[in-house]
Image: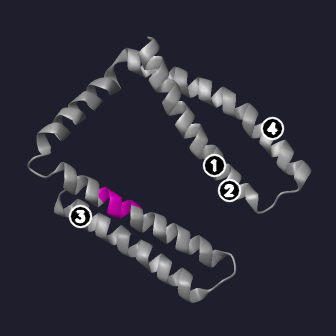
Amino acid sequence: MSKRENRGVVVLFLIGCLLIAAGIFLDIDYYSSIMIGCGAAMSLNCLANWIRNYYHNRPENIEAYQKKKKQQDIDLKDERKIYIRYKSGYITWAGFMIIYFIASFIMALLRVNAYIILVCFAMGVVHYCAATVIYKYLCKEM
């Protein structure tokens, strides 16, 4: 990781820490927890990226990392892989649009307020996981 990238990661990590501290000290009803969550996410993301880059740039891991990057570049340009990514995205989108509408209808009937954010987040995670599973299944099938 270059010095410039390191500076960016450190700055974002510090901004995340400041958001956490501001959320703890300001104690505003709902917004404090949002600030703490955003700060923790930013800080942990920066920390994870720094650890990942440190691991891949160690002398014993550089060769494997370069090989992995080369394979990723090939996969990004492979027409079959592009089609599979498109198809998995479309299948996932079509299926989950139905689920989103049904869930919205059920939440409207139940008059749910606090769980909307949690449900939307969970749906996003499930959407991502399903697209990945479908992509891997189509890779094996074709």
For residue 124, what is the image quadrant?
A: top right
> How far across and down, in percent of the image, does residue 62 sit?
13, 44
The correct choice, above or below, for 24 with respect to 7 in the image is below
Q: Evaluate whether residue 85 shows in this view.
A: no
Instruction: Estimate the spatial distance between the alpha carbons at disc 4 and disc 3, rounded to whole Å.
Output: 45 Å
Identify the mark nearer the N-term, 3 or 2: 3
Query: Residue 109 or 38: which is nearer the viewer?
Result: 109
Q: Position of residue 85 (x, y in %)?
A: 47, 25
Q: CA distance from mark 4 to mark 2?
A: 16 Å
Give the spatial CA distance, label 3 vs label 2.
33 Å
Instruction: Give above or below for 4 relative to 138.
Output: below
Q: Is residue 123 visible?
A: yes
Residue occupying the point 54% across, 39% down? 128
Instruction: Report x, y in % for residue 99.
Output: 74, 35
Q: Are marks 2 and 1 in contact (CB under 8 Å)?
A: yes
| Nearer-N-terminus badge (4/3) | 3
Q: Residue at x 63, y 49 (%)?
A: 122
* Mark sitting earlier along the chain (4/2): 4
Decide if residue 131 is on the left or right side of residue 99. left
- Residue depicted at 15% across the width and 51% down the height: 57
Q: Amino acid at mark 1?
A: Ala
Which residue matches tag 1? 122
| Quadrant of the drawing holding the C terminus | top left
Q: Work out which quarter of the rendered image holds the N terminus and state it.
A: bottom left
Real-space Cα distance between discs 3 and 1?
32 Å
Distance from label 4 to label 1 (Cα)? 15 Å
Location of mark 3 (residue): 6
Q: CA distance from mark 2 to mark 1?
A: 6 Å
Q: Helix or strand or loop: what does disc 2 sit on?
A: helix
Label of residue 118 in the image = 2
> Which residue range is magenta in the image?
45-49
10 Å crowding of disc 3: few (<14), some (14-19), many (20+): some
